Image (tube, grey):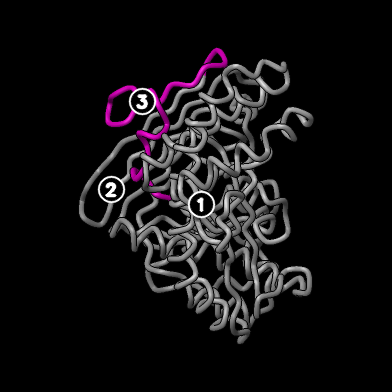
């Protein structure tokens, strides 16, 4: 049985104490503002070294305090054990994994692989293109350290290239273009491959839950050949050069993976504009289900699922279907309000904790 043990010091509004989560499924039940989401946030923070709710680590410190610490011990079903310690003090964050200092958060990859379901996921369906690109990049970054490096290099080159355009210093553009194309082409290929595999998962899930056939994800790369396929390096070079004068006028890079489009389509037409609110919500939730399945297919490992009040917005029938569609997981953590019918989703091994004022008590 997987084991997750976490100790808290001055994190959010949680009590300074330790909690051992020894079951396959853990339910946190409590009113809003009592600390349910903070518990999920702490697990996610231990997994990735960052929060899913804020980019400012200082906001994680309990009111009236100046620092915080989290210590996590995670043992998988195969008995593999890792310890993570994160300390925030004097506006600086220090991370240790198994007693060794972590210099780069990518070193945490695969330690506690978490897939998070939360309300903000709706942005993947109805939000800006950047949010959909973020989702695909996140899927790849969960297991592919090389992709993380390529993406970082691309963003660094893009920033330098945009600065040259803004300052009208064009002498380095040819050099930047070579690097931009090399890294950008690698990003497009990995995104294209990932979305192809996603479509083998997502469309079937959506049809099973909703009865709607033919919904799929379409990748529209910024760099495309005349045949609407991923172009060669030579073709990309022509595309980039053709935009040079326009980029000088606009003072910004107009083509590349940072402008890729990802759409949800049905029968060749955009699906989201005509979809109901419930259908859009299911797109977002099932993307996360597909993310978990995709991760397992690529790594052979089961993820930890964190579900933050996402079932609340579905009707009872859809809740049941989504629950049945969840993939194999190492552990499952769900938050519920007291009035929700969480008893329906319990298993014989599920443990339920009542959360109040940052404290937790296991329900008998």
Alpha carbon distance from label 1 to label 3: 33 Å
Q: Helix, strand or loop at disc 1?
A: strand
Residue range of the region highlighted in magenta in the rendering? 89-114
Q: Looking at the picture, does residue 317 appear above or below residue 202?
A: below
Q: Which residue is mark 3?
A: 102
Asked if residue 95 lies in the magenta stretch, the reply is: yes
Left-right relation of 329 to 259? left
Whether residue 330 can be seen here:
no
Q: Which residue is mark 2?
A: 75
Left-right relation of 108 to 325? left
Badge number at residue 321: none
Earlier sequence position, callout 3 versus callout 2: 2
Q: Who is closer to the viewer here, 170 or 187?
A: 170
Left-right relation of 293 to 16? left
Whether residue 53 can be seen here:
yes
Q: Position of residue 315 (x, y in %)?
A: 69, 77
Mark 3 burial class by Cα count in 10 Å: few <14, some 14-19, many 20+:
some
Q: Who is closer to the viewer here, 205 or 363?
A: 205
- For residue 174, what is the image quadrant? top right
Q: Which residue is mark 1?
A: 361
Q: Residue at x 46, y 72 (%)?
A: 201
Q: Residue furthest bottom?
A: 211
Of discs 2 and 1, which sits in the foreground?
2
Q: Quadrant of the N terminus?
A: bottom left
Asked if residue 223 lies in the magenta stretch, the reply is: no
> Dots 2 and 1: beta carbons under 8 Å?
no
């Amino acid at each position: 049985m997987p084991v997750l043990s976490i100790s808290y010091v001055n994190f959010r509004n949680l009590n300074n104490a330790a909690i051992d989560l020894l079951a396959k499924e853990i339910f946190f039940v409590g009113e809003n503002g009592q600390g349910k989401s903070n518990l999920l946030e702490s697990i996610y923070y231990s997994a990735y070294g960052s929060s899913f709710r804020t980019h400012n680590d200082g906001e994680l410190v309990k009111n009236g305090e100046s620092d915080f610490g989290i210590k996590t011990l995670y043992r998988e079903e195969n008995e593999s054990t890792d310890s993570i310690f994160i300390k925030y003090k004097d506006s600086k964050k220090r991370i240790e994994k198994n007693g060794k200092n972590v210099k780069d958060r990518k070193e945490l990859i695969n330690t506690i692989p978490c897939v998070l379901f939360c309300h903000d996921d709706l942005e993947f369906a109805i939000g800006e293109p950047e949010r959909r690109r973020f989702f695909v990049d996140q899927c790849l970054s969960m297991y592919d350290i090389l992709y993380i490096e390529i993406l970082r290099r691309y963003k660094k080159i893009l920033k330098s290239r945009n600065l040259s355009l803004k300052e009208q210093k064009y002498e380095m553009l040819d050099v930047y273009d070579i690097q931009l194309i090399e890294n950008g082409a690698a990003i497009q290929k990995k995104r294209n491959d990932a979305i192809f595999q996603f479509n083998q998962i997502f469309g079937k899930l959506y049809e099973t839950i909703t009865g709607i056939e033919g919904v799929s994800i379409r990748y529209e790369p910024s760099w495309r050949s005349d045949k609407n396929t991923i172009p060669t390096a030579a073709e990309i070079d022509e595309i980039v050069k053709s935009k040079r004068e326009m980029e000088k006028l606009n003072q910004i890079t107009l083509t590349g993976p940072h402008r890729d489009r990802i759409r949800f389509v049905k029968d060749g037409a955009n699906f989201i504009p005509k979809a109901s609110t419930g259908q859009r919500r299911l797109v977002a939730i099932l993307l996360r289900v597909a993310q978990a399945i995709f991760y397992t297919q690529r790594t052979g490992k089961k993820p930890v699922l964190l579900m933050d009040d996402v079932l609340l917005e579905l009707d009872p029938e859809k809740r049941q279907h989504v629950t049945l569609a969840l993939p194999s997981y190492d552990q499952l953590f769900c938050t519920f309000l007291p009035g929700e019918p969480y008893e329906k989703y319990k298993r014989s091994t599920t443990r339920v904790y009542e959360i109040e004022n940052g404290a937790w008590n296991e329900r008998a």
